[in-house]
Image (spheres, rainbow, N blue to C red):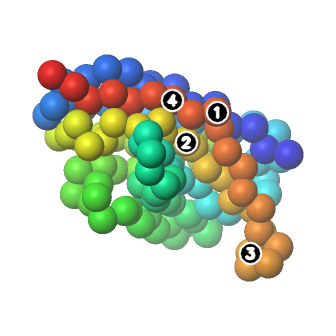
Amino acid sequence: QVQLVESGGGLVQPGGSLRLSCAASGSISRINRMGWYRQAPGKQRELVAIIASSGSTSYANYGDSVSGRFTITGDYAKNMVYLQMNDLKPEDTAVYYCNARTGLGRYEDDYWGQGTQVTVSS
């Protein structure tokens, strides 16, 4: 099993910045991809950013709504991933969830943190 704990959410004004953190524990050796998703009231959960690595190679993908404003990074030695959020907009208000994936294809499993609230308001 994998356990994920998010932190760093809070209230920020439009145009401000926040950095979210996710700490992974448990069977961390099985994780091959981590990311962030968010869910706003009345909306479907959507992809924010994902990051994966193999050896010394890594890649990242971003959702269209956050591309150019958010950056995902990882500190694999500490089993941590981060989400730097800049130029925040009211539309970014949501619960942000850390995600970890193990396996490939039909054998993949997803694990989720409890979520952290991000509110962007004047």
Instruction: Give the residue type that dot 3 points to.
Output: Leu
Q: Distance of mark 2 from mark 3, alpha carbons?
A: 21 Å
Q: Residue at x 23, y 37 (%)?
A: 90
| Residue under numbered circle 4 | 116
Which residue position holds label 2? 97
Tag 2 or tag 1, which sits nearer the N-term? 2
Task: Check disc 4: other Cα within 10 Å, few if <14, some if 14-19, many if 20+.
Answer: many
Q: Amino acid at mark 4?
A: Thr
Q: Is residue 57 left or right of residue 14?
A: right
- Decide which of tag 1 and tag 3 comes sooner along the chain: 3
User: With 65 as the anchor, is 54 left or right in this view?
Assistant: right
- Name the residue: 51% across, 29% down: 116
Which residue occupies 78% across, 44% down? 2
Which residue position is annotated with label 3?
Answer: 104
Callout 1 touching callout 4 (CB < 8 Å): yes
Regarding residue 28, the answer to whether it shows in the image is: yes
Query: For the residue labelled by badge 4, is the local secondary structure a helix, a strand or a loop?
Result: strand
Q: What percent of the width, then of the height, locates residue 80?
A: 57, 39
